[in-house]
């Protein structure tokens, strides 16, 4: 069985294998991949922004003081990659997200987006 699995060829990555399909994006990548290198990150970025919006709405509906919001966010169902991109500001008054198209580093140039939360 192991020899059979090892004999199978490993498939190359293809845009067609992603769980979502974007015909325009696939054509752009086929025409000029270097010019659209960050294009595949746009759809996951939209999903990440949607998740942050859900979290911000849920957190705004809670009556948690800002110091307790860190513990609340830690209890939420997030993947490890989402956790490194979704953070709570130091004062607990906004959720920040770093889009998938950007590296996970502090963003002094304003690369992250913020969802402001009500102060209690």
Image (spheres, rainbow, N blue to C red):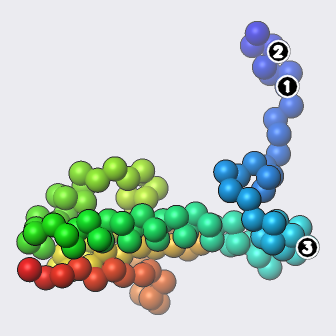
Return the residue nearer the eye: 115 or 8: 115
Are the residues tagged 3 and 1 within 8 Å (C-beta)?
no
Return the residue nearer the eye: 83 or 46: 46
Which one is in front in this view, the residue at disc 3 or the one at disc 1?
3
Rendering coords of residue 70 (x, y %):
19, 63
The image quarter containing residue 52 is bottom left
Q: How many marks?
A: 3
Task: Name the residue that disc number 3 marks.
Answer: 31
Q: Secondary structure at mark 2?
A: helix
Return the residue nearer the eye: 111 or 26: 26
**What distance separates the C-alpha of mark 3 from that of mark 1?**
30 Å
The image quarter containing residue 115 is bottom left
8 relative position to 51: left or right: right
**What distance separates the C-alpha of mark 2 from that of mark 3?**
37 Å
80 relative position to 8: left or right: left
Rendering coords of residue 2 (x, y %):
75, 13
Q: Secondary structure at mark 3?
A: helix
- Earlier-in-chain disc, 2 versus 3: 2
Instruction: Report crowding for label 3: few under 14, some 14 to 19, many 20 or more residues within 10 A (C-alpha).
Output: few
Residue 4 marker: 2
Task: Name the residue that disc number 1 marks.
Answer: 8
């Amino acid at each position: 069985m192991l020899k059979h699995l090892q004999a199978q060829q490993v498939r190359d990555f293809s845009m067609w294998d992603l769980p979502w399909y974007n015909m325009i994006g696939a054509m752009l990548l086929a025409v000029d991949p270097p010019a659209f290198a960050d294009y595949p990150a746009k759809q996951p970025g939209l999903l990440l922004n949607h998740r942050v919006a859900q979290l911000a709405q849920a957190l705004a509906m809670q009556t948690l003081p800002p110091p307790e919001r860190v513990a609340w966010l830690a209890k939420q169902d997030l993947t490890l990659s989402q956790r490194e991109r979704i953070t709570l500001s130091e004062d607990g008054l906004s959720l920040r997200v770093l889009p998938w198209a950007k590296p996970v580093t502090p963003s002094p140039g304003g690369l992250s987006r913020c969802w402001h939360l009500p102060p209690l």
